[in-house]
Image (spheres, rainbow, N blue to C red):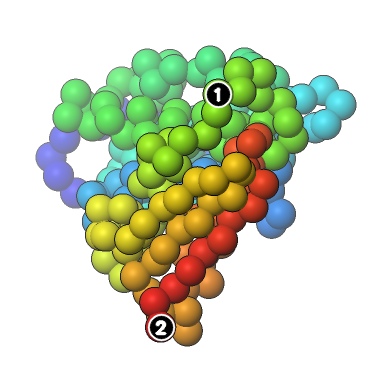
């Protein structure tokens, strides 16, 4: 391990992370970062429909000690909170709860916080709870697809030019992939794309086309 000034709390959460794993059939989930860039975190949530509190929060992490520790502490900070309270957790709070992080590793706490917020956003979109309903644009779709990882390279599908074209017409989103439909990773990529695009309030249908 690099000779970085990690606190005892960071090392405790790194060696014994809380709430590790995934939730089957989560109410919301999201992934931030990518393994090719060094750090990645996926966050899964279960929401109490009556109280709108987080009944369960789990995470999966790929990366350094700071990344694992911040994923662990974020789940502890968020568990039991309302959606609004959880969305307001800051990366500074996460860092302080760990006794501080080396400046070079502060981005790890940002990654974990963004993962939590994106998972909550995914839940809100799926349940029609988004109040500011801005029209979907092709650029907005591109931005969401930057969070879909291409397992072939570990980078996102936009950066690796796997997405050849995107069209949007009256709620119909058509995505052209430079990938054979029978490719081993095609089902996983398709599922991730649909999870990112279908919850958008004005998207009626997502069609994914493959190369022959």
Quarter-of-image position of residue 170: top right
- Drawn side of residue 97 relative to residue 162, left or right: right
Left or right: 122 as drawn, with respect to 95 = right
CA distance for labels 1 and 2: 35 Å
Residue 74 in the image, given as x and y percentages of width and height: 50, 30
The label shown at residue 212 is: 2
Q: Is residue 13 left or right of residue 22?
A: left
Residue located 83% across and 31% down the image: 49
User: Residue at the front extreme?
Assistant: 169
Residue 130, above or below 64: above
* Location of residue 23 in the rendering, given as x and y in whole percent from the top left corner: 65, 52
Residue designated by label 1: 134
Q: Is tag 1's residue or tag 2's residue first in the polypeptide sequence? A: 1
Q: Circle 2 sits in a helix, a strand or a loop, which is it? A: loop
Where's residue 191, x and y in %?
56, 62
| Residue at the right extreme, as displayed | 50
Pick whichever, 147 or 13, lies toward us: 147
Q: Are marks 1 and 2 in contact (CB under 8 Å)?
A: no
Q: Residue at x 25, y 60 (%)?
A: 160
Which one is nearer the viewer's eye here, 88 or 10?
A: 88
Does residue 115 appear in the picture of this structure? yes
Q: Is residue 35 visible?
A: no
Secondary element at tag 1: loop
Q: Residues within 10 Å of mark 2 (few under 14, many from 20)?
A: few
> Which residue is found at the position 46% from the left and 35% from the top?
137
Residue occupying image coordinates x 39% and y 77%: 211
Q: Position of residue 20 (x, y in %)?
A: 54, 49
Quadrant position of the C terminus in the picture: bottom left
Q: How many marks?
A: 2
């Amino acid at each position: 391990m690099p000779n970085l000034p990690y606190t005892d709390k960071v090392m405790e959460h790194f060696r014994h992370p809380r709430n590790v794993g995934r939730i089957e059939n989560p109410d919301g989930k999201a992934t931030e970062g990518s393994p090719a860039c060094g750090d990645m975190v996926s966050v899964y949530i279960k929401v109490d429909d009556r109280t709108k509190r987080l009944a369960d929060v789990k995470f999966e992490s790929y990366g350094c000690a700071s990344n694992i520790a911040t994923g662990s502490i974020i789940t502890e900070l968020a568990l039991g909170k309302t959606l609004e309270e959880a969305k307001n957790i800051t990366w500074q709070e996460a860092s302080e709860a760990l006794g501080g992080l080396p400046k070079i590793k502060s981005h790890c706490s940002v990654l974990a916080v963004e993962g939590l917020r994106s998972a909550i956003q995914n839940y809100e979109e799926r349940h029609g709870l988004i109040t500011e309903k801005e029209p979907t644009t092709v650029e907005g779709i591109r931005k969401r697809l930057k969070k879909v990882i291409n397992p072939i390279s570990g980078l996102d599908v936009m950066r690796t030019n796997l997405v050849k074209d995107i069209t949007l017409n009256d709620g119909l989103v058509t995505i052209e992939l430079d990938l054979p439909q029978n490719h081993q990773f095609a089902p996983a990529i398709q599922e991730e794309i649909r999870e990112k695009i279908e919850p958008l309030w004005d998207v009626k249908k997502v069609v994914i086309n493959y190369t022959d």
